[in-house]
Amino acid sequence: MVKTPQYQNQIIKICTNSHLTANQIYNKLQKKHPQIGIATVYRNLKRLVKKWKIKKFKGIHKKAIYEADIGLHAHIINNKTGQIKDIDISKDIIKNIDIPKDTKKIDIRLYVD
């Protein structure tokens, strides 16, 4: 059996340059590890998010989406197709927003109909 850290490394690779649901990640992992269960995927996703190794955000229909890019950026989400694109943003854009000092994460999303 593969140990948890190895699953975590594979999840990070799968989520690199991608915006995926837990089921999509599970389907990709299952090709290489047919014995893996969905609960194992969720458990590892939760740990990775907590460790800030991957980012979790809401896509359309409030579905959880995961990605490995944890840097400062925004998402454009197409409400019709569900397609998600990253947009690089400058820290200058958010410096004039009154954000509490103890804030650790900032999530910026733009929705397009």
Image: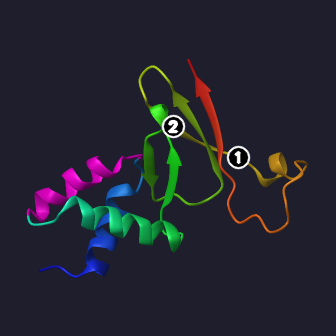
Q: Is residue 103 left or right of residue 11?
A: right
Residue 4: within the magenta? no
**What's the residue at 43%, 29% (across, down)?**
82
Q: Are there few (<14), some (14-19), or many (20+) residues within 10 Å of tag 2?
A: some
From the image, tell me which residue sits under label 2. 85
SS assignment at label 1: loop
Q: Main secondary structure of the magenta part?
A: helix
Residue 20: within the magenta? yes
Q: Are there few (<14), some (14-19), or many (20+) residues within 10 Å of tag 1?
A: few
Q: Amino acid at mark 1?
A: Ile
Image position of 1 with respect to 93: above or below? below
Q: Position of residue 83 (x, y in %)?
A: 44, 31
Q: Is residue 44 left or right of residue 100?
A: left
> Which of the two residues, 74 or 27, is positioned nearer the viewer here?
27
Check whether the beta carbons of the residues at disc 1 and disc 2 lie within 8 A of each other. Answer: no
Q: Amino acid at mark 2?
A: Lys
**What's the residue at 11%, 80% (across, down)?**
1
Q: Position of residue 71 (x, y in %)?
A: 61, 59
Q: Which residues are magenta?
A: 19-34
From the image, tell me which residue sits under label 1. 89
Q: Position of residue 79 (x, y in %)?
A: 50, 24
Q: Is residue 37 left or right of residue 75?
A: left
Figure quadrant of residue 30: bottom left
Q: Is residue 43 left or right of residue 48?
A: left
